[in-house]
Image: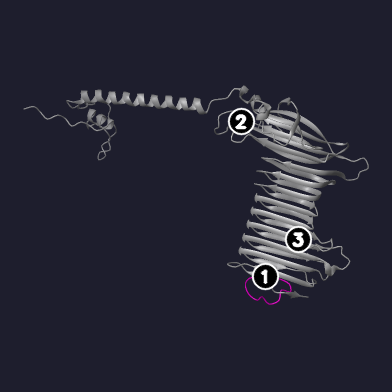
Amino acid sequence: MPSPPAPQPASCQEYISAAAPESKHPTMDMDRKTPLQFENLPAPAIAAEGESARRKHKKCKKHKIFKRLGFSALLLWVGARYLKFESPMSFQLADEAWPIPNDMSVDHCEPWSDNGETDPDITEDFPYSADASFELPASADTLFLISRSVRNRRVFSTGRVNYLQSEEVSDSVKVDITAYFWHEEYLDASKACLLTRDDDQTGVGVFTKWKGEERRRREHEKLRFDVTVTFPRTEDESPLAINRFLTDLEFFSQTFADLSNVAFGKLYLKSALAGIRGETLYAGNASISTSLGPIQIQSLIAPEATLSTSLGAIEGTYNASKLTLRTANGPINVDVNLSNDEDDTVAQLTMHTSNGRIQSNINLLSSKEDSSDASFDIAARTAHGPVDLVVLSAPLNSNITLAAHTAIGAASASPSSHIRRVLPRVHEPWFGGRQCRQGCGRPVGRGAEPELGV
């Protein structure tokens, strides 16, 4: 009677088990603890169907190899399709393909002058650098500096702009640009151009683009631009007058040295993903904004100023008649000199953050003959964090409205003792403590508006 067929293994691993059934090898005897013996080893027992199982095992192994080869070929094809290196000619497009704003015209684009290898004392991040320079008339109605890039492309450009004033007497503002790069084809994917807009408006633009496949960028595909804007001196040592100066930069930080001898009529500064810092700035009207980064000005003097950032702190000393400070996520820590000089006006200070502490020391000033006509409106609001407002000084008998609002945190307001009439509105509905350190009278309840009389 024929013997029943052997059961078929369900996997390659079972083929291996079938080909080599359990056999006794002279391993360590755990009871006797004798060492391994390698002489006169008995031949392993092999089942009758062992040869057939081995053939099937080899066939399964070949199948695995072909599967791996096919998968490797697929990976190579994907790499060639999506990660291929573009030729240097890939960015040689028409000028209109460069991201130049529609309301601007290109006067000319300055060719990069190759500096060769970079000085390791300056930067170790990029091996090569190149320069371009421009001169702008200081008397122009508007001077500007912008950057634009084709988004979601391989070349990624960042930079920093430094502003300073030279000791030289001149009628021109100099703009010097140094580009740092790894490969020349990436430098060729950038331009520095002299631009004009409308009547008597001129400036410099830094542009990058790339016609490569969209994919994750590599470290060597980055560009960095160091820009230096140098303002001249006047012949009679009077402050240099710049009618209007604006910037609209993407991934550039901006840093101002002491420009106390430069007077901007209007100063508009904008960065996307970098901070804005400065020592001393004078402007008739100032607007400073960034999407991601702090704003830190040691001394800003501007009758009207607005500072805003989406993610970062606002710090420094500010002198204004109307001052607005806004950040979405970050603290506000400022010293403010708030002036009320014009008739029928109220000096205003507004501070707002969604998530952070507000700390402010405030001096109230007025040149009015009757200081009792001086009026000030101070408001601070945060959703998550404490509020601490301290009025250090104020005109005698002046009128002040002082409001502090917080959802989670303590609110503290401290008016000076000789102020005639103050309406401190301290509001913190859920958590924190309520403090009003001088002359606040008896609180009526949460969100109350006690009238203080001194």
Numbered range of the magenta stretch: 437-448
Residue 199: x and y, percent?
81, 38
* CA distance separating discs 3 and 2: 48 Å
Q: Quadrant of residue 443?
A: bottom right
Crowd class of label 2 (few under 14; some 14 to 19; many from 20; radius 10 Å): some
Which one is earlier in the sequence, the residue at label 1 or at label 3? 3
* Residue designated by label 2: 221
Q: Between residues 377 and 387, which one lies in front from this camera angle? A: 377
* Residue designated by label 3: 348
Horizontal arrangement in the rendering, residue 94 relative to residue 16 (left or right): right
* Amino acid on which disc 1 is placed: Gln
* Residue designated by label 1: 435
Q: Secondary structure at mark 1?
A: strand
Residue farthest left in this picture: 1
Q: Between residues 371 and 336, which one lies in front from this camera angle? A: 371
Mark 1 near mark 3, Cβ–Cβ under 8 Å?
A: no
Q: Quadrant of residue 23?
A: top left
Q: Nearer the viewer, mark 1 or mark 3?
A: 3
Q: Secondary structure at mark 2?
A: helix
Which one is earlier in the sequence, the residue at label 2 or at label 1? 2
Residue 150: x and y, percent?
63, 34
Which residue is located at x 68 percent, y 77 percent?
442
Is residue 209 visible to us here? yes
Give the vertical position of 436 relative to 62 (above or below): below
Residue 444: x and y, percent?
65, 76
Q: Secondary structure at mark 3?
A: strand
